[in-house]
Amino acid sequence: MTTATAERQAQKNYTDWYASTGPKAQQPRLTPEEEARPFAKYYHEEIPAPDPAHYALMHSPCDPAKAIYPEQMNDLLNPGDLAAETGWCNLPNGAGFIANRILYPDVTAEMIDWWFAWHPLEDLRYRIWYPPQHGGIMLSPEGRKRILDPRIPLAERNWGVTHHVTENCDCGMENIDISFLSPRDFGFDMSRWKEPFVATFAGGYGWAVTVDRNDMSITAPALMCHIFRNVPGGLEHRTRFWMGYRFSCGKPELSLPPGVAVPEAAVKGLAQHNVREFTRFKYFLPRIYREFGGRMEV
């Protein structure tokens, strides 16, 4: 193992990682060692703009009556479409709701499973996904060990693993802990978990605080669901976020005090970021998978 490889694989403790996020939030130029990585070229690419008609759906809130609550997540396993497949709003209980749908003509479920296991292994892998707003990522030593365990199917390697990411979702750089769950632990009905209703899944719960956190920083948990199904024309990616919810005893639970709502700017910011980030993903993933897919170490 080279010194550079050992440095990439070294795991910071949480305190040291947190201290490093301030500089990462400034999105510094790549280091010479990062520039030498075989996938660094993706960092310098021009990022495709979203389809204007699609992006326009995120300009203003959708009708909350068309949204689903996390307790209705199994509606995502129904055939056909739901009333709100792309849009955002505040629900009557103050929670933030986001839906987004993108069709990937050249992506498979196997590519999705590989990407979500491969990219958290080093900062640069996360940064090349969406360079304008991705600052960095870290796994615990235990999380890294699971991600690299060849005995575990790729689709399952993130289950129980937390990604510590530094990212800007249009409201400034935040440190976000995203704890991934199995679809069963997320709350899906596994008796319905089969084709053609679902091909794969990546989801869990998260908590975000600003990188320059102070005693007045506003924080709230969120549930994140990326569910994929095969449809004519490719793989369909359907996203749902429920901001202001957490899991309690395995069930979704609203965590907002009465009369408090997730700020509209935060809901809209994440919704628009999601469209831009996964528009990039649509064109980026097939190419990087052809080059590195199936391998974890590069």
Image (cartoon, rainbow, N blue to C red):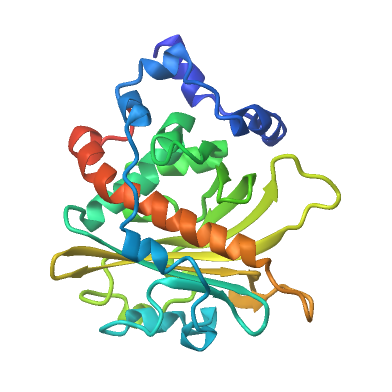
Residue 37 in picture, x, y percent from top left: 35, 20
Q: Is there any visible trace of residue 293 in the rendered image?
A: no
Quarter holding the N terminus is: top left
Which residue corresponds to the image point at 44% horizontal and 56% vertical from the top-left?
Answer: 274
Q: In the rendered image, which quarter is residue 35 located in?
A: top left
Q: Nearer the viewer, residue 182 or 222?
A: 222
Q: Is residue 41 depicted above or below 2 in this figure?
A: below
Give x and y (percent) for residue 30: 47, 20
Please give the count of numbered marks on the rendered protein.
0
Figure quadrant of the C terminus: top left
Q: Who's the residue at 73% across and 73% down the image?
A: 256
Let me know if residue 178 appears in the view: yes
- Residue drawn at point x = 67 percent, y = 83 percent: 93
Q: Is residue 176 above or below residue 17?
A: below
Residue at 63% across / 75% down in the picture? 95
Q: Nearer the viewer, residue 163 or 267?
A: 267
Between 275 and 297, the one nearer to me in the picture: 275
Residue furthest to the bottom: 65
Horizontal side of 21 relative to 63 (left or right) equals right
Furthest residue in direction left, as rendered: 232
Q: As drawn, is 223 to the left or to the right of 182?
A: right
Query: 168 or 109: which is nearer to us?
Result: 168
- Measured as percent of width and height from the top left, residue 114 is found at 30, 46
